[in-house]
């Protein structure tokens, strides 16, 4: 899951990643995580490196990329 500091960055990431063909979903940030933004992006974690590269290329600011656990 990708965490953001603002909803603006989350929405930009959603547009960028969808346009690049990533299968993603905006989800509420799980309670066990702290975030300034209330939404995160869920994705196939095996694609972490390529997803991070795209976000960096497109200058999307992220707070972190973490595996989604079932806490």
Image (tube, rainbow, N blue to C red):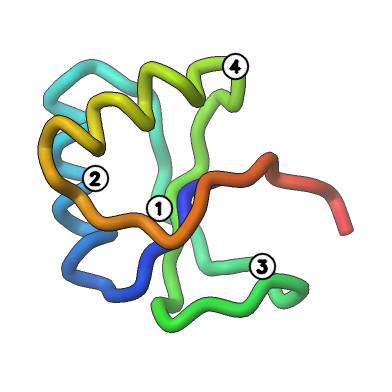
Badge number at residue 46 = 4
Check the picture and name the quadrant holding the N terminus. top right
Q: Which residue is mark 2?
A: 14
**Left or right of 63: which side holds 46?**
right
Q: CA distance from mark 1 to mark 4?
A: 18 Å
Taking depth in this image into account, of 18 and 46 the one nearest to the observer is 46
Q: CA distance from mark 2 to mark 3?
A: 18 Å
Q: Position of residue 36 (x, y in %)?
A: 43, 83
Q: Which residue is mark 1?
A: 26
Q: Quadrant of residue 33?
A: bottom right
- Residue 70 vs 22, above or below: the answer is below
Going by the picture, which residue comes out furthest to the right? Answer: 71
Please tell me how crowded label 4 is: few (under 14), some (14-19), or many (20+) other residues with Cα within 10 Å: few
Q: Earlier in the sequence, mark 2 or mark 3?
A: 2
Q: Earlier in the sequence, mark 1 or mark 4?
A: 1
Please tell me how crowded label 1 is: few (under 14), some (14-19), or many (20+) other residues with Cα within 10 Å: some
Check the picture and name the quadrant holding the C terminus. bottom right
- Residue 63 vs 41, above or below: the answer is below
**Left or right of 63: which side holds 7?**
left
Q: Position of residue 11 (x, y in %)?
A: 20, 58
Q: Which residue is mark 3?
A: 30
SS class, disc 2: helix
Taking depth in this image into account, of 31 and 49 the one nearest to the observer is 49
Q: Earlier in the sequence, mark 4 or mark 2?
A: 2
Q: Nearer the viewer, mark 4 or mark 2?
A: 4
Q: Earlier in the sequence, mark 4 or mark 3?
A: 3
């Amino acid at each position: 899951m990708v965490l953001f500091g603002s909803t603006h960055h989350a929405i930009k990431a959603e547009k960028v990643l969808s346009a690049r063909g990533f299968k993603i979903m905006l989800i509420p940030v799980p309670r066990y995580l702290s975030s300034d933004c209330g939404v995160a992006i869920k994705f196939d974690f095996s694609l972490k490196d390529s997803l991070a590269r795209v976000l960096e290329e497109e200058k999307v600011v992220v707070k972190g990329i973490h595996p989604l656990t079932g806490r």
